[in-house]
Amino acid sequence: VYHLQQRAKNENFELLLFDSGDVIEGTGLSDATPIHGQYIFPIFERIENYTALTIGNHDIGHASTVELMENGFIKHYNENPSQSIGKYLTANSRKEPSNEFLGEPYSIYYTNFGEKILLM
């Protein structure tokens, strides 16, 4: 990721990095833990410069995983004012019974060229 971002900067183009969810499915690493995602979430948090991430249907299959995400993984992205680590967006996932969004419903991203992009 770092190499591609440096190339984009050197060649004067914008690189947007998204994760479309299902972080904990299929790796074996997270599936082997008592709480799915227990080891994989901290690894993902080390990847810098995401534009945005979102939740996948496999990420919310267990209440313990959702709780782990709320208490750490999602906060890591959404409570940092820096644009450099991206935002965790979940316009299609809400908490019960409060009906609050699990993450942020949208984010405004400002490109290096001064363009504004709505992310949902």
Image (cartoon, rainbow, N blue to C red):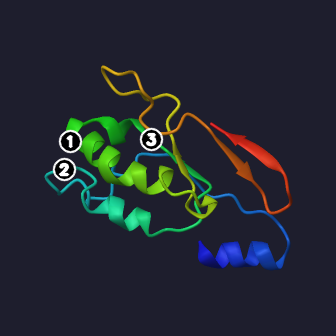
Give me the disc on residue 35.
2
At horizontal 43% and vertical 40% (from top left) the residue drawn is 56
At horizontal 76% and vertical 72% (from top left) the residue drawn is 8
Rendered position, 71 above or below 61: below
The Cα atoms of the two marked residues, 2 and 3, are separated by 17 Å
Give me the disc on residue 2.
none
| Observer able to see residue 23 | no
Closer to the N terminus: mark 1 or mark 2? 2
**What's the residue type where badge 3 is placed?**
Ile
Residue identifier under label 3: 55
Give me the disc on residue 64.
1
Q: Is residue 67 left or right of residue 74?
A: left
Rendered position, 16 above or below 25: below
Q: Is residue 53 left or right of residue 110?
A: left
At horizontal 59% and vertical 65% (from top left) the residue drawn is 49
Rendered position, 44 above or below 103: below
Q: Secondary structure at mark 2?
A: loop
